[in-house]
């Protein structure tokens, strides 16, 4: 019996995994959820000796039941290969009593690679399975990392086009450079005159436009999403929580069954939700600490029960977390409402009409595993600096938010449970901000950080920390810009239409 999927808003039921992956978003605007979260079939003790790829298979086969073993293993092999600069794929580093799960060893040096290296393969297999005859057009809004990772994953993949929208001025210079130098004749990048939420709202609007869908279909195109709302992204992210736990066991940092906490630097709520799925599968996780930057909508939500996006949008130096509408939270809302699609839809309608909603106490009780926390840019920077000075270990600004939030949590709660900090980007992806935190001193004494180019900072960071410069950074050092499209927020649909020729 296949595990079936349904929309969080009740419109669609009895959807197979491959159909859900292909569609991305449900027709009613909801997100696909499995009718139940399967239990891990292998005891974690056994997982301790398994490779990342084998762990991936054990987790994904439970969710993607309409894939054959051969199909799934081939997707996994093509995704988690030498694109990653370490055989471990997701190494676990220990520093100052914290365990950092490094998810940035893929081709774009951020954690989105974990899911986006496999999604194109899951999607092309899904298309074949469902005899889809149209070209798949991946539409994606990005706050910086998704865009590049999605393009890297889909570049020149047969039968696909990919269009990425990012907020002009709202991503790091390195992120922008990574995207605008992307090769592949099926890749398109557009800077919009607005922020990330505008980009995301615009993309959602396009997905919801039935007229447009029909027009595209006539031209032989079918839209799909590589955003973290796609179940084909969420499930691969469950894998590394299981892998991290297995690694802790193997390294004898914990005993079998011992509960751990995880702290996750959060934006769209996909990563931490995958951790929650892992817990539901039976992995011994106690608390899921949701770390936000100054855009602390989620912190407020977990502390008050009210989600309210009506506030100032703050640009921070952890831009991938600068988000006011965390799309994947809808899945937690749905689970906490006892899989009540009506209730979920009503709350999401409130969100879209008033920009806010409040959950019931009963629902809040079901979310008790989550703790919200936030860190200011100052706390983030101080954390990065202190960790480096004490241990020589360097983290990026997103991971810094998580570590700072974790430290505050321990101070307040005295909770001594061993904790995995999910490390979402290489320090080199945010070199300037990391260097600022570490304190830049020109040995000649005349230049400040503002005088340095991105790559000069990369070299300074390498000299200061001894951390090798990733190949992904070297690769774009001399690359030329291939993309320069821009558009207004209300012109996104036209832009898509124009790019598909
Ligand atoms: C995307 C991203 C996040 C946020 O992850 P979500 O799954 O959207 O919560 C955090 N850090 C980095 C570096 C990211 O790229």
Image (cartoon, rainbow, N blue to C red):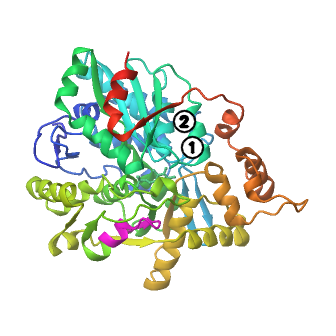
Q: Element under label 1?
A: helix
The residue at the point 33 percent across, 72 percent down is: 300
**Compared with residue 487, is residue 46 higher up or lower down, i.e. above or below?**
below
Which residue is drawn at the image coordinates 66% and 69% (left, top)?
387
Q: Where is residue 81 in the image (x, y as percent from the top left)?
A: 54, 33
Q: Quadrant of the N terminus?
A: top left
Nearest the viewer among 406 and 29 is 29
Disc 1 packing (10 Å; few <14; some 14–19; many ≥20): some
For the point 27% across and 35% down, which residue is it? 206
Return the residue at label 1. Answer: 175
Q: Is residue 348 left or right of residue 220?
A: left
Name which quarter of the figure residue 221 lies in. Answer: top left
Indicate yes or no whether the magenta region holds residue 244: no
Q: Nearer the viewer, residue 404 or 186?
A: 186
Query: Looking at the image, do the residues carrying marks 1 and 2 touch, with CB atoms under 8 Å apart?
Result: yes
| Label 1 beta carbon less than 8 Å to ligand 1 | no
Q: Distance between the residues labelled 1 and 2?
A: 6 Å
Regarding mark 2 in the picture, which secondary structure is present there?
Answer: helix
Q: Position of residue 463 (x, y in %)?
A: 81, 54
Q: Which segment is the magenta one?
A: 288-301
Residue 151 spot, x, y in % from top left: 48, 32
Quadrant occupied by the C terminus: top left
State the residue position of label 2.
179
Q: How crowded is mark 2: few (under 14 residues within 10 Å), some or many (20 or more)?
A: many
């Amino acid at each position: 019996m296949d595990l079936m999927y349904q929309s969080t808003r009740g419109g669609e039921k009895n959807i197979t995994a491959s159909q859900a992956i292909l569609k991305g978003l449900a027709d009613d605007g909801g997100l696909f959820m499995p009718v139940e979260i399967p239990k891990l079939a292998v005891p974690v003790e056994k997982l301790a000796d398994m490779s990342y790829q084998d762990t991936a298979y054990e987790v994904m086969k439970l969710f993607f039941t309409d894939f054959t073993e051969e199909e799934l293993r081939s997707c996994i092999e093509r995704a988690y290969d030498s694109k990653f600069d370490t055989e471990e794929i997701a190494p676990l580093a220990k520093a100052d009593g914290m365990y950092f799960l490094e998810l940035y060893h893929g081709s774009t040096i951020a954690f989105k690679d974990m899911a986006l290296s496999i999604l194109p393969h899951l999607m092309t297999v899904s298309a074949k399975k469902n005899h889809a005859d149209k070209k798949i057009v991946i539409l994606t809004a990005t706050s910086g990392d998704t865009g590049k990772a999605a393009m890297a994953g889909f570049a020149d993949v047969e039968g696909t086009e990919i269009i990425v929208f990012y907020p002009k001025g709202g991503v790091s210079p390195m992120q922008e450079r990574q995207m605008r130098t992307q090769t592949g004749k099926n890749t398109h990048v557009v800077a919009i005159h607005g922020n990330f939420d505008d980009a995301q709202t615009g993309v959602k609007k396009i997905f919801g436009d039935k007229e447009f869908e029909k027009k595209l279909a006539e031209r032989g195109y079918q839209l799909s999403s590589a955003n973290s709302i796609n179940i084909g992204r969420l499930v691969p992210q469950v894998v590394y929580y299981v892998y991290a736990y297995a690694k802790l066991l193997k390294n004898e940092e914990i005993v079998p069954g011992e509960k751990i906490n995880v702290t996750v630097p959060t934006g769209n709520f996909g990563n931490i939700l995958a951790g929650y799925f892992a817990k539901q599968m039976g992995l011994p996780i106690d608390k899921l600490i949701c770390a936000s930057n100054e855009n602390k909508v989620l912190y407020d939500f977990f502390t008050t029960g009210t989600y309210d996006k009506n506030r100032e949008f703050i640009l921070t130096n952890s831009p991938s977390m600068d988000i006011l509408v965390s799309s994947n939270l809808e899945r937690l809302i749905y689970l906490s409402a006892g899989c009540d699609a009506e209730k979920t839809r009503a709350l999401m309608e409130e969100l879209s009409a008033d920009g806010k909603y409040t959950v019931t106490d009963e629902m809040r009780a079901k979310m008790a595993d989550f703790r919200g926390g936030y860190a200011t840019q100052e706390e983030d920077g101080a954390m990065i600096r202190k960790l480096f000075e004490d241990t020589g270990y360097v983290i990026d600004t997103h991971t810094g938010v998580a570590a700072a939030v974790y430290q505050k949590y321990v101070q307040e709660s005295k909770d001594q449970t061993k904790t995995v900090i999910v490390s979402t980007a290489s320090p080199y992806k945010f070199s300037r901000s990391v260097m600022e935190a570490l304190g830049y001193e020109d040995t000649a004494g005349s230049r400040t950080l503002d005088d340095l180019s991105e790559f000069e900072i990369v070299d300074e960071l390498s000299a200061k920390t001894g951390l090798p410069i990733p190949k992904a950074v070297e690769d774009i050092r001399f690359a030329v810009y291939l993309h320069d499209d821009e558009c207004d927020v209300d012109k996104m649909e036209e832009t898509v239409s124009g790019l598909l020729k």
